[in-house]
Image: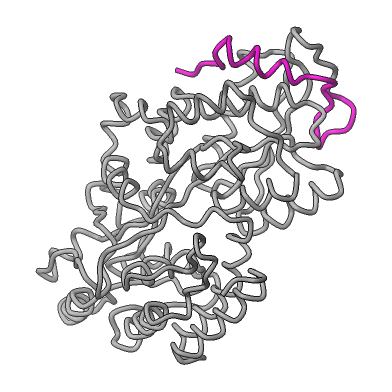
Amino acid sequence: MRRGIAATALVAALALAATACGGGDGGDSGETKAGGELSGTVTWWDTSNDAEKASFQKIAEAFTAKHPKVTVKYVNIPYGEAQNKAKNAFTSGSDAPDVIRADVGWVADFASLGYLDQVPADTAKKVDAEFLPQAAASGKFEGKTYAVPQVIDSLGLFYNKKMLADAGVQPPTTLEELKTVSATIKEKTGKTGLYLRGDEAYWFLPLIYGEGGDLVDAKTKTVTVDGPAGVKAFKAARDLVTSGAAVTNATDGYTNMQNAFKGGEVAMMINGPWAVADTYAGDQFKDKANLGVAAVPAGSVKAGAPQGGHDLGVYAGSKNRAAAHAFVEYMTSQDVQVQSAKELSLLPTRTAAYEQPDVKASEMVQFFKPAVDKAVERAWIPENGSLFEPLKIEYTKAITGASTPEEAAKSAGAEFRKILKGWK
C-alpha cells in the first residue's frame, strides 16, 4: 500500500507555497495558493541504478493518486554524473530539478552553497523523532535540516555459497583469512576469491577503518588519510591483489565486478544493499538462496564499513516548493520505504519500518541493518564529496601498483589540504 503525507505535514508544506512552476519544467506547472490544492509539475532527479529505477519511477508517479493535479516528471540521472549536473543546474537555474536524490555526502555541500530549501519545521521534527539518528544526521548542515533520508546503506561481503562450499571454506572474517580462503578457492575451483573494486573511493573506506583510521578528523580539522593507518590501508589493498586473493580493474570497476560475481568468475565481492536486486538477476543466483552476505573482513585493528545512503532535498529555487516538499514526504513515508525494502532490499531510514512484516521478511535487510548500526559515520562537511575524487585517483594508483602505498597516502593528504584550506 502507498499513502500520501499526513494532513499536518501537508499544511506545513502548503505554508511555503507561492507560485507552482516546476523548477525544471518551464511554465506548465500551474499555481498553488496557500491553503489550496497542490498542483503543477514536480521534476525529480533520481540517481538509482538500472535494477531500481523502474520501481522508483512507478512509486514516484503514484504520488498523483493522492494529488491528481500534480504531475511528477521522473528523470533518471546516472549516479556518477549527478553531483556535477545538479550543481550546474542549480547554479544556472535552468532545467533544475525540484527534488534531487542526493548521496548523503553531497547534502552539506549543496546546503552550504544555498542550493537546498530548508525542510519544513514540522517535517524536520519528524525526521529527528522518527528516523534513524545516523540517517537524520546526514541531512543536516549547521544544525538545520535540508534533506530527508530516503535510504541508508553500508557495505558487506557478498559470497557465492555454492562456490565456498565446493572449496570447503567459510566466509572470511579478516583480510588475512581472506587471502587463505581465496587461495583454497583457487586451488579447489580454479576461480578467483574476491573482486576488489579499485576505481571508487567509497570502497577504500573499509580498509582505512579496518586499520583504525579515517580520512579526516572534523573536530580538530586535521587530515588523517596520510597517517600510519592510511598507509596500511593502501598497503592492504595492494597486498590483496599481489597475493592473488583478489582481482581488480582500474576502469568501470563496478560493472566488471558485478558481471564477474554474477557469472561465477569470482566467489566474493564487497558491495551494498543496492546491488542485491541486480545480483539476483545473475546466472549464479537464479536460486536466491545461493547469495550470502557477511561483514566486511576486518583489517589489523577492527572491522569497519562506511555509512552511505541517499537523501531527498528540494531545490531552493523551485517555483513549486509546496508540492516538492509534499513529494519528498511521500517518497520517504513508511509505506514507500517498506515497499522499497520488499522489492529492492533497500534499507528504510524510518525506525518503525523495521517492525513491518515485509521488512522483517527481507533476509538482506535483516543482515544489513546491524551493519548499518555499526557503520562508521562520515564527516558531514561540505567538502565530503570533493575529497573522494583525489582519493579515488590515489586508491587506483596504489591498488594497481602505479604508486607505492606511501606515495598514494602522501598525495591524497596533500590534495585534501588543498581542498580543506586551513586544515592541519
Between residues 386 and 270, which one lies in front from this camera angle?
386
Residue 213, image quadrant? bottom left
On the question of residue 189 being in view, the answer is no
Between residues 14 and 181, which one lies in front from this camera angle?
14
Tell me what residue is drawn at x 39 percent, y 35 percent. 341
Tell me what residue is drawn at x 51 percent, y 61 percent. 218
Residue 338, image quadrant? top left
Q: Is residue 243 above or below residue 118?
A: below
Q: Position of residue 246 (x, y in %)?
A: 33, 78
Residue 16, image quadrant? top right
Tell me what residue is drawn at x 85 percent, y 18 percent. 30
Query: How is the protein colored in the picture?
Result: one colour
Please give the range of residues in magenta: 1-29
Tell me what residue is drawn at x 58 percent, y 60 percent. 384
Q: Is residue 201 above or below residue 326?
A: below
The quadrant in which the N terminus is found is top left
Residue farthest to the front, as pictured = 220
Q: Position of residue 49 (x, y in %)?
A: 54, 49
